[in-house]
Image (spheres, rainbow, N blue to C red):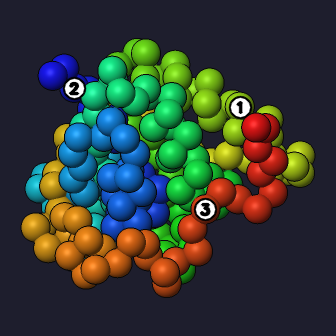
Amino acid sequence: MHTETATFAAGCFWGVEAAFRQVPGVVATRVGFTGGTTQNPTYKQVCTGRTGHAEAVQVTFDPERVSYDELLDAFWDEHNPTSRNRQGFDIGYQYRSAIFFHSAEQAAAARASRDAVQEQLRWPWQKVVTAIEPASAFWPAEEYHQRYLEKMGRATCTAELRGRAPDVVRAT
């Protein structure tokens, strides 16, 4: 089977990972850190906000079963892209919204998708703050973070406010 990789940051990686694991065609996920300067950072280091990393999910997917555009839709649905460095109760640069592209095709699709979401915002002063950056080193988080919600017998992060920004009007 031919697979591809996609990497997304949308707040606390536990809920984001759980959401992507539900997408048919996603064959694996792992949570970790990317976009920073510290080599092989720990969760504790990233939580200080001084490493420059985002909590992220690396998604391995079968492009015959799910398209990158469908993964982008899942990404936008999982968080509020107008909230800078914050998702729900999680605040800090490590919780930023970002798409880390692995190819020129992913970069173009991410930008087009971001622009479409921007056009759907109800209020003209709202801005999608999602960064679109080349993928860099991805450092897996400690094992206890992998599939954390599943290990805890939970489907979602109920303590977090999840979902698309309330002022986004989605065309169906």
Q: Which numbered circle lies on residue 3?
A: 2
Check disc 3: other Cα within 10 Å, few if <14, some if 14-19, many if 20+: some
Q: Amino acid at mark 3?
A: Gly
Sequence order check, earlier mark of 3 and 1: 1
- Residue 100 lies left or right of residue 152; in this view the side is right
Q: Which residue is mark 1?
A: 116
Q: Quadrant of the N terminus?
A: top left
Look at 69% across and 31% down and name the residue there: 115
The tag on residue 163 is: 3
In the rendered view, would you say 103 is above or below 115? above
Assign the C terminus to one quadrant of the image.
top right
Q: Residue at x 47, y 56 (%)?
A: 10
58 sits left or right of 54 in the view: left
Q: Position of residue 124 (x, y in %)?
A: 89, 46
Compared across the picture, whether 104 is left or right of 110 comes to: left
Q: Give the percent coordinates (x, y) of residue 4.
A: 26, 26
- Distance Cα–Cα, label 2 vs label 1: 26 Å
Q: Quadrant of residue 7?
A: top left
- Of labels 2 and 1, earlier in sequence is 2
* Element marked by disc 1: helix
User: Which-is-in-front pick, marks 3 and 1?
Assistant: 3
**Residue closest to the eye, 103 or 65:** 65
Q: Whole-Å distance between the Cαs marked 3 and 2?
A: 27 Å
The amino acid type, in three-letter code, at marker 2 is: Thr
